[in-house]
Amino acid sequence: MDFYLINAIKAIILPPGNVFLLFLASYFLVKYKANIARRFLLASCIFFYLMSMPLVSKTLIRSLEDYPPLTQSQVALKNAQAIVILGGGRSENPEYGTQNPFDVSASTLQRLRYGAFLHSQTGLPILLSGGKIKSKDIPEGKLMAKSLKRDFKITAQWQENRGRNTAENAINSREILTAENIHSIFLVTTAWHMARAVDIFEQQGFKVIPAPTDFKGLQSTRFSFYNFVPSGDAIENNYIALREFIGRAWYFIRY
């Protein structure tokens, strides 16, 4: 229920849905309230420009990336017992010639790559966490295990294949790792997602060592002409940032 509710909310208040609603309101108001219609139209144009501006996207994403990258000396000093890698989606990859065309997404692959690096530095066992939304889908944890073995020659110690969101990932991971007397973990996820993930895993009793990857907000936000030129990447990153703000607000209320 949470999954469908939050996706319905996102469709309404995130771009391009919110911009479309403003345009739609302008269209219906133009015959009766022309002044208000013009204001709606102007607001939608301004908002769309802001959402396509690199300066805005870099600022928003940077505000979400609360945890810096781990240094190798920090990795060596941390007293973790396992590495937990969270899934970040799936994609269609029929080019591999397998019966099932789905594989891990680019975001998930980034997380797996860094998790594999941490494993090479520490030798710690890996738990892969990711479930499925549709009953017919292969759990994301299984896709991650396949990629980890195929691409990095590493076998995961455990798979958590039931979690549909970060909260369920944490709850189910606790069940698996508590049975192994593991309470201290490196937690691997995308940098902008890390703060929410840390909070929910700590609620489950874990001592969490944040191991963020795939940073998007490290680029300079200094004055530059290109920071004001609309771009597709900026639209995507602004969408990601606003979606994460909604996710944090929802988790604050829900959990």
Image: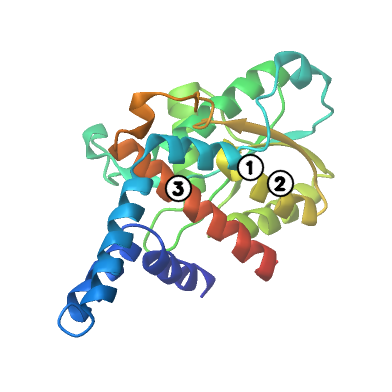
Q: Residues within 10 Å of mark 3 (few under 14, many from 20)?
A: some
Report, in whole angstroms, how far the alpha carbon at label 3 lies from the one at label 1: 13 Å
Q: Return the residue at label 1.
A: 194
Residue name at image x 60 percent, y 54 percent:
166
Contact between labelled residues 2 and 1, with CB atoms less than 8 Å apart: yes
Query: Which structural element holds mark 2?
Result: helix
56 to the left or right of 114: left
In the rendered image, the vertical position of residue 41 relative to residue 140, given as above or below: below
Query: Mark 3 — residue?
Result: 240
Looking at the picture, does residue 68 appear above or below residue 199? above
Amino acid beneath label 2:
Val
User: Count the marks: how many?
Assistant: 3
**What SS does tag 1 mark?**
helix
Q: Nearer the viewer, residue 95 or 89?
A: 89
Residue 41, x across and y down, in percent? 25, 64
Residue at x-position 43% and y-position 27%: 150
Q: Quadrant of residue 162?
A: bottom right
The residue most toward the front is 35
- Which label is found at residue 68? none
Q: Earlier in the sequence, mark 3 or mark 1?
A: 1
Can see residue 146? no
Q: State the image coordinates of residue 215 (x, y, percent, origin top left).
A: 53, 30
Q: Which residue is mark 2?
A: 198
